[in-house]
Amino acid sequence: MRINFAHIRHPSTSGGSIDFAVFDAKANSNTTEAKQAVLFQLTQAARGAGHKIDQSAIAYSQGGQIQFFGDKNLVDFLSKNGLPQWTHWIDT
């Protein structure tokens, strides 16, 4: 299965920069455990493909709304700034 994702470097609030990934994926169920498992699998796959990732999240549609799940600071950032454009894809 091909999964789109955005891999972005952004200035951090503490100085320097942070590399984050946002994956276009939804877990098979709406449990925290299922979402964590999908996020872990995709983050590891992207890292294995050579991407530096400090924080990651999944983005999915639920009830017609885009929802985010992942690292709290990244989810807060995405909630304020919206979904970034997809920059890459990986096969899982």
Image (tube, rainbow, N blue to C red):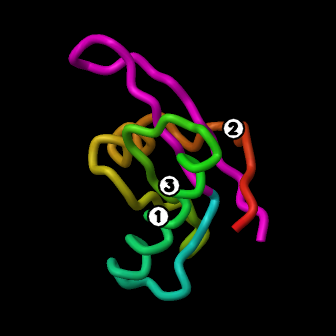
Estimate how packed mark 1 is, as few (under 14), some (14 to 19) or many (20 or more) residues with alpha carbons within 10 Å.
many
| Camera-nearest residue between 30 and 35 | 35
Give the residue pinned by disc 3.
Answer: 43
Q: CA distance from mark 3 to mark 1?
A: 6 Å
Sooner in the amino-acid sequence: mark 1 or mark 2? 1
Task: Specify the segment rendered in magenta.
Answer: 1-23
User: Residue at image x 73%, y 42%?
Assistant: 88
The image quadrant where one finds the N terminus is: bottom right
Percent from the top left, x then y, of residue 36? Answer: 38, 70
Question: What's under tag 1, amino acid-wise?
Answer: Leu
Are the residues tagged 3 and 1 within 8 Å (C-beta)? Answer: yes
Mark 3 or 2: in front is 3
Give the residue pinned by disc 1.
Answer: 39
In this view, the residue farthest toward the bottom is 29
Give the residue pinned by disc 2.
Answer: 85
Q: Give the quadrant of residue 78.
A: top left
